[in-house]
Image: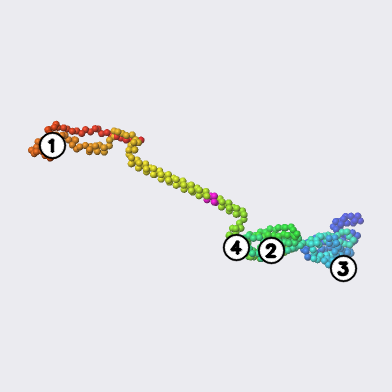
Amino acid sequence: MAGSRGGVPVMLLVLAGLTVSGSGSQILEGPKNATVLKGSEAHFNCTVSAGWKLIMWALKGTVELSITPQAPIITNNRFTSASYQDVDGNFVSEMIIHDVQPSDSGPVQCSIQNSDLHGTAFLSVEVMGTLNIPGNSLVVTEGEPCNVTCYVLDWSPLPDISWEVRVPVSHSSYFSFVESGDLLLAGSVLGLTPLGNGTLTCVATLKSTQAGKSLTVNLTVVQPPSDSIDQSGSALPTWAIVLLAVSFSLLLVLIIVLVVIFCCCCVSEREKKESSYQNEIRKSANVKASQGAPETKLKSGKENYGYSSDEARTAQAASLPAKTAELSLPEQCSSSPPHQEPHKHQPGPARRPQVSFNLYSPPRVRNVTLV
């Protein structure tokens, strides 16, 4: 039995850290971990069984508070105590740390006098810093994208940042950032396209304590100026300016090519018209030449010497004397003397009757064949 008391039961109590060897009192329940904000109070409870003589509280290895059955022994005003009994009649000692600072972060121990065993917990202190949005009142242009930045300063650990947008918008989004320097600097950037007036609220929340702060600013939306089109045109990004320059260059080259093609078409059309006009003139000149010089045509062909035109025969027949076709007969006697011309000689002795014939040669036909 003694072995069991000094063996397994003692080992179990040592592992639990809740027994005091050599005494009848024991630590039934030690303190629990606590996370508090800077400047607030931290509370730790330690439950011990009856028979204890002295309870000691230590922070980071230094005893800050002692409790006796008669009264607490306070050495530091930041550390006070409270006590009461639970339903089972066990004694509950409570240590209260006032105005907790980040330097207080560390282990908290509850122990009984003349004991190497103790109950341990850990104290975490969170620091809630400040929020800052440059400009208490923001003035932006309606329908134009803008950014609003919320900075968090001296927070430990860094909080979660969110936004409450009470402004009519067409788009909004945000992202967080962290910068390292002499002071821990972080923040969040809200991007939005406002359509009306309202308020923007930056909310920072610590995860463990769920404590947080918020900062609200007014957002005033104004109408865009009349020359906003010109201003937006002058504020185009570099890639847009390069794209416009290339587009204008290609358009200019295309215009030049079209002008050259148009000029070539005009010149070609004019040459065709001039060539057609010259051909017409040449044809007219050839026709006139052929009508004005028939001999030239005849010379260019072969002449038929057996051809005689009707006009030539008619002209030849008209040129012969009218009496050539008549017979010359002797004069007959008449009762009246013949009429004599006063200046003509007397007719000579009678001549022999003469008959005159006009002998025509057979008609000759002349044909001309043009090749």
**Image location (x, y in percent) of residue 244:** 58, 53
The answer to whether any part of residue 28 appears in the image is no
According to the image, label 2 marks what residue?
134
**Tag nearer the camera, 3 or 4:** 4
Q: Amino acid at mark 3?
A: Ala
Figure check: 286 above or below 207: above
For label 1, count other residues whose C-alpha is less than 10 Å away and answer few (under 14), some (14-19) or many (20+): few
Horizontal side, residue 266 vs residue 61: left or right: left
Q: Residue at x 54, y 50 (%)?
A: 253
Q: Earlier in the sequence, mark 3 or mark 4?
A: 3
According to the image, label 1 marks what residue?
345
Q: Residue at x 81, y 65 (%)?
A: 97
Q: Distance from label 1 to label 2 (Cα)? A: 161 Å
Q: Distance from label 2 to label 3 (Cα)? A: 54 Å
According to the image, label 4 marks what residue?
224
**Tag nearer the camera, 2 or 3:** 2
**Image location (x, y in percent) of residue 351:** 13, 32
**Image location (x, y in percent) of residue 265:** 47, 47
Q: Looking at this view, is 314 or 347 the one in front?
A: 347
Asked whether the beta carbons under mark 3 and mark 4 sit within 8 Å of each other, the answer is no
- Label placed on residue 71: 3
Quadrant assignment, res 211: bottom right
Q: Secondary structure at mark 1?
A: loop
Q: Amino acid at mark 4?
A: Pro
The quadrant the C terminus occupies is: top left
**Tag nearer the camera, 1 or 2:** 1
For label 3, count other residues whose C-alpha is less than 10 Å away and answer few (under 14), some (14-19) or many (20+): few
Q: Earlier in the sequence, mark 1 or mark 3?
A: 3
Find the magenta span and give its range: 251-255
